Amino acid sequence: MSRTFLIIAEHRDGKLRQVTMEALQAAIEASEHDDRISAVLIGSGVEPLADELSAYPLSEIHLLDEDQFLTYNPETYTAALGGIIETVRPDGLFIGHTAMGRDIAPALAAKLQAGQLSDVIAIEKIDDSVLFTRPVYAGKALEKKTFAQYPWVVTVRPNNFIAASRSDHPPASITRVVSTSATPLRTIVKDVVRKTSGKVDLTEAKVIVSGGRGVKSADGFKPLEELAELLGGAVGASRGACDAGYCDYALQIGQTGKVVTPEIYIACGISGAIQHLAGMSGSRVIIAINKDPEAPIFKVADYGIVGDLFEVVPLLTQEFRKVLN
Amino acid sequence: MKVGVIMKQTFDTEEKIIIHNGIISEEGVKFVINPYDEYAVEEAIRLKENAGGQVVAISVGPPRCAEALRTALAMGADEAILITDDRIPHDEYAVSVVLAAYFADNPFDLILGGNFAIDTGAGQVAVRLAELLQLPHVSSITKLTFISVERVQVERDAEGDLELLELDLPALFTAQQGLNEPRYPSLPGILKAKKKPFQQLSLDDVGIDPNDVQAKTNRAELFLPPVRAAGQILQGDLPEQAAKLVGLLHITPRPGGTSL
Ligand SMILES: Cc1cc2nc3c(=O)[nH]c(=O)nc-3n(C[C@H](O)[C@H](O)[C@H](O)COP(=O)(O)OP(=O)(O)OC[C@H]3O[C@@H](n4cnc5c(N)ncnc54)[C@H](O)[C@@H]3O)c2cc1C
């Protein structure tokens, strides 16, 4: 029997987020050839993004483009997306495991009385069932799970599925939907302070330059920022650095921070505590810079440099600049 | 004001994971309150200390969770409820339905929980509960301020951006790191905790038919990630090492950032 999958498209700074194409790829990997995959795009002034999205292998795009959707509000978004779900009746819903996805997926799952698997990193089909791989204990172990019944909800960890490519078929049809919000709004968004505007998102970054207590001050992050910027990457941190007030908790990587899987992770002045390793040991290549040759971070690093980070990081920036120019 | 804190017990973050007979071994493991739930407990106690009221800590889980609830009582919660029943599966849908049944009979002004549990990493139960109870919610908050008796302002951490929201109670919030610094239970607190009300409930007590909490997901396999072997420590003077490393990486510039 043919199924319908729905992906919730996300955007940021006027662009479709990479994780949207990754969620689409996840849906493709879970699907059979007669399944339909549609998308819903929600925001304000996002029509051009719907056109862009229509080039991807989707059968339909539901467009919710209204002023009230300018910023994410759990109440308005849940009501509007809930409305779409009632009409589309998807068998599977795919969302990025992002700030928005983490918040809205369980609300929609509850509405649908559906099971949810969060933070999925791989999908495989065996006979008739679809297996979803996801980390537990912040990646200290992995599990493969199945759903007992339809419908189901999946959140997809950024950076783990290859992004779906555009299709050469005619563009997907775009259906404009007008939301009908019945209940009075209880939640209002007063302000959004963009601290990350224009920067590469930590969970989506291909390169992360991360600093620990060894960075010693907020200023000490400067050489790391420079290297990250050169490589088009993002800056992360250990809890040690966050606790010391050198940077925002939003940068924290680890068991109680973000779990990241970049292609290159450069740990500078980070000892490699088990809670930190939990958040980054899925990175493809790990580079450690630490002046203590006994630091546990070297046990997981592919390449280690024993030395003062304030000497090593600028040297690396210099060398990378040579090959990039 | 009545504040409910939903919390679970998890492995201490120091613990290594050992799989034995297809499940994660709990032998010799140190258990703690899930770190995010600890922020929720602390915030609830602070609210009570500032404005009066009552804090009830509620957990759904195996009997060992009683210990985590006792810690919450020792920190300053007034009452603890443990809903424990072998018929409740390890499934976020099921747990949220059980909690919703409890809260439907026991209304609160404010429900606090953790942003996610560091064991399952699912981050579903609290938000599902809000939806089931038809309460507004904000997840991942780093600040909670009362602007009137029943209206609050919260700061939400959204992947590094800060969102400022206002809403009326009753409502549900999940705690993010940065909300507060949880206290350690004091010795008098630990002694007092022993006399505080502690109720253990079964599915029947909350009026749930086991058929209504069948798991929506099943685990097919559990395994450890491939062990990361230590790689090479580069040699030579630092400029040489830096050049060597860059040579080893073969990076290519791409529009979305550099790739291997
Ligand atoms: C419940 C709980 C949850 C936690 N969650 C997390 C988490 O999510 N993420 C996390 O990271 N931690 C977490 N931790 C904390 C963790 O246990 C460590 O304390 C923390 O990771 C240490 O940070 P650090 O490596 O920056 O600091 P340290 O352990 O102090 O290490 C600093 C390192 O810098 C090196 N160094 C100093 N100066 C220089 C220099 N000039 N050049 C080069 N190297 C230098 C030192 O040799 C040392 O190895 C958690 C702890 C608990 C209890």
Image (cartoon, rainbow, N blue to C red):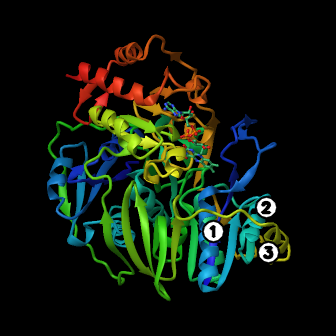
Gap between marks 1 and 3, in whole Å?
Answer: 21 Å
Q: Considering the numbered disc 3 on the image, is that residue within a helix, a strand or a loop?
A: strand
Observer-nearest of B36 and B238: B238
Q: Are marks 3 and 2 in contact (CB under 8 Å)?
A: no
Residue at (55%, 57%) from the top-left corner?
A: B116
Residue mark closest to the camera, 1 vs 2: 1
What label sits on residue A144 in the rendered view? Answer: none
- Is the same chain shared between marks 1 and 2? yes
Residue mark closest to the camera, 3 vs 2: 2
Residue at (43%, 53%) from the top-left corner?
A: A248
Tell me how many marks there are.
3
> What residue does disc 3 label?
B199
Q: Is residue B187 left or right of residue B212?
A: right
Rendered location of residue A146, percent (x, y): 55, 45
Q: Mark 1 vs mark 2: which is more N-terminal?
A: 1
> What residue does disc 1 label?
B42
Residue mark closest to the camera, 1 vs 3: 1
Residue at (35%, 18%) from the top-left corner?
A: B246
Q: Is residue A133 visible?
A: no
Q: Report the amino acid beneath label 3.
A: Gln
Q: Is residue A147 left or right of residue B101?
A: left
Residue B157: quadrant of the picture: bottom left
> What residue does disc 2 label?
B67
Outermost residue, top side: B236
Gap between marks 1 and 2, in whole Å?
Answer: 17 Å
Outermost residue, bottom side: B149
Q: Report the amino acid beneath label 1.
A: Glu
The vertical placement of B47 against A101, above or below, is below
Q: Mark 3 vs mark 2: which is more N-terminal?
A: 2
Q: Report the amino acid beneath label 2.
A: Glu
